[in-house]
Amino acid sequence: MSNRFPEWLKKKIPGCGDAQGTRNLIGDLGLNTVCSSARCPNQGECYSRRTATFLILGGVCTRNCRFCAVDKGIPPPPDPMEPQKVAVAVAALGLEHAVITSVTRDDLTDGGACHFVATIKAIRETSPEATIEVLTPDFKGLLRPVDMISSALPEVYNHNLETVPRLYRRVRPGAGYRRSLTLLERVKIKQPRIKTKSGIMLGLGESYNEVIKVMADLRSVDCDIITIGQYLSPSERHLEVQEFVRPEVFQSYRDTALKMGFRNVACGPFVRSSYKAGEFVRQVQK
């Protein structure tokens, strides 16, 4: 389809805030963010509000998902000081809600779970009032890493389904739809007080009814929060956008999700997994 964006996908660059200050802080600490690594369209807006989603375990992923701009290959060993560096950044930015995600590390025995736990603990020590959200890989279906991270009691445990089951082989090679649902279910079984969250992208060739079925599947495992956004291809090497979904369709999904019982729904063309995550978790906690 044409690469020309419709009017509702044209985003103004924010003219205020401290975006450069945020970039400098992250750069000085040698940290990665998904904002930059995944070429998020909201990067300028979030950085200007002095917030970011931290990407731990390095910047190289062992998976080859065709929608994602994060570098793929053989990653270096994890930086043992990274949890403390993230904690320093969270404190320096004054974050009330810290979002921690990672590349997939299939090369590590625990998939990087210990690193997640160390990062949560480091943030708790330096910013005890901050809430914490983790967005983890699927750990190849292993449940022990999920248990380790959920036992550290982040306020939100996020794991994205990304798309509908029919498109998994093309969009998420190496992943499994049922495996991801089992992960979210496991968190609720082990730590019922943790809010679970998941997200999907639209515009990859899914049908309306397929999206509704994904939403129903998430509610069947008691998922609390859902995010639904528009897929935008990072480059010509990535999957092509099949459809630019109109705002009124996003609104329809939002209305349906709320009727299904999701405690919070972020639904719109520019929505991403961690976009305004702090605002949403505060609403859920009320």
Image: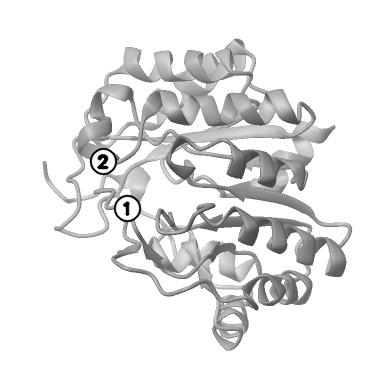
Extreme residue toward the bottom, this view: 28
- Relative to 95, does residue 7 appear above or below in the rendering? above
Residue at the (74%, 76%) spot, across then down:
88
- Relative to 67, does residue 141 appear above or below in the rendering? above
Q: Nearer the viewer, residue 4 or 178?
A: 178
Viewer can see residue 267: no
Quarter of image, res 119: bottom right
Q: Secondary structure at mark 1?
A: loop
Quarter of image, res 81: bottom right
Count neighbours of disc 1 (C-alpha within 10 A) and say few if under 14, some if 14 to 19, many if 20 or more: many
The residue carrying mark 1 is: 63
Type of amino acid under label 2: Pro
- Relative to 103, does residue 156 appear above or below in the rendering? above
Quarter that holds the N terminus: top left
Q: Nearer the viewer, residue 133 or 234?
A: 133
Residue at the (35%, 47%) spot, across then down:
9
Quarter of image, res 90: bottom right
Extreme residue toward the front, this view: 109
Q: Are marks 1 and 2 in contact (CB under 8 Å)?
A: yes
Q: Which mark is residue 17?
A: none
User: In the visual, does 24 lie left or right of 125?
Assistant: left
Residue 200 point in image, percent of width and height = 42, 34
Whichever of labels 1 and 2 marks the residue nearer the N terminus, that label is 1
Residue 123 point in image, percent of width and height = 77, 64
Q: Secondary structure at mark 2?
A: loop
The residue carrying mark 2 is: 173
Q: Nearer the viewer, residue 14 or 1?
A: 1
